[in-house]
Image: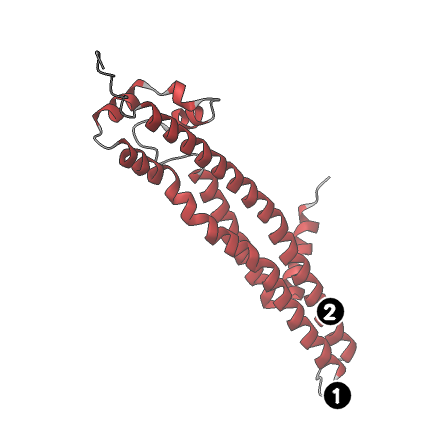
Amino acid sequence: MIHFGDIFSEISVLMSQGGWVFFALVALAFGIAFALLSLWSATRLPDAPILAPDEWRKMLRASDPAEFVPDELKRHLSRSGDKATFLAAIARRLFAKSERRFPFAFLLISAAPLIGLLGTVSGMFKTFRGMSAEATAAPIDVISAGISEALITTQTGLIIGVPTFIICAWLKSRHDELVLRFRRFESALLQNSGPAAPAQQAGH
C-alpha cells in the first residue's frame, strides 16, 4: 500500500540534499515532459490539410497508400497545376512542426545527464571543503552532504535522461515512418499522373 506521507518525506529529503542542481533537474524534467507531449501531438498530424488527421494516418499506414486516395484529395490534386509543388506543400503542413521540435527535445534530454554531472562536481566541492581545515561545520556533516548531493543529482539526471530518450526515439521512429510512407505515396501519385507516351504514327 502506498503511503503518500512517506513519498513526500522522501521528496523533501531529495530536495534538501540535492541542492540547487536538483531543482534545475526538476524544472528540466517538466520541460522535457512538455516537449514530449507536444511531439506526440505533432505526430498525430493536427495541421493536416484537406483531410482529417485520422484519414491521413489511416491512408499512410495502408500497405499501398496510393490505392486508397479519398475523393476529396483526388479533386484537389486534379485542380492543382503542379502536383509536385502541391504535394510538397502538404508535406510541410504535415511534418514541419514535428521536424522543428525533435532537435529541441533531444537537446533538452541530453542536458539532463550533464546537469546531473554538474551536481556531481558541486557535491565534490562540498566534500573537499569538508575535508579542509576551514570548514565551519563538522567535517563529517559537510562530507556526507557533499556525497549525498553528488549521488542524488547524478542519479536524477540519469533517471530523467534515459527513459525520455527512449520515448523520444520511439516518437522519432513513428514520425520517420510516416514521412517515408508519404514519400512513397507522393512518388506513386506523380508517376501515375505523368505524361502519357505519344502514340506511334501509322504507316511508318
| Picture layout, residue 25 above or below residue 72 | below
Left of 188 or right of it: where is 17? right
Q: Residue drawn 45% across and 22% down?
A: 64
Q: Which residue is mark 2?
A: 147
Residue 204 in sight from this viewpoint:
yes
| Residue lying furthest top | 203
| Residue lying furthest right | 140
Q: Quadrant of residue 20?
A: bottom right
Residue 13 in sight from this viewpoint:
no
Label 1 and label 2: CA atoms lie apart by 18 Å
- Residue 106, given in percent of the width and then of the height, sits at 52, 52
Label 2 element class: helix
Q: Are marks 1 and 2 in contact (CB under 8 Å)?
A: no
- For label 1, the crowd category at 10 Å Cα-Cα, with few meaning under 14, some 14 to 19 and many 20 or more, is few
Residue type at mark 1: give it. Answer: Ala
Front-most of residues 122 and 169? 169
Q: Residue drawn 27% across and 37% down?
A: 85
- Residue 137, given in percent of the width and then of the height, sits at 72, 81
| Disc on the earlier residue, 1 or 2 | 1
Q: Which residue is mark 1?
A: 133
Q: Quadrant of residue 97?
A: top left
- Quadrant (top left, top right, bottom left, bottom right) of the C terminus: top left
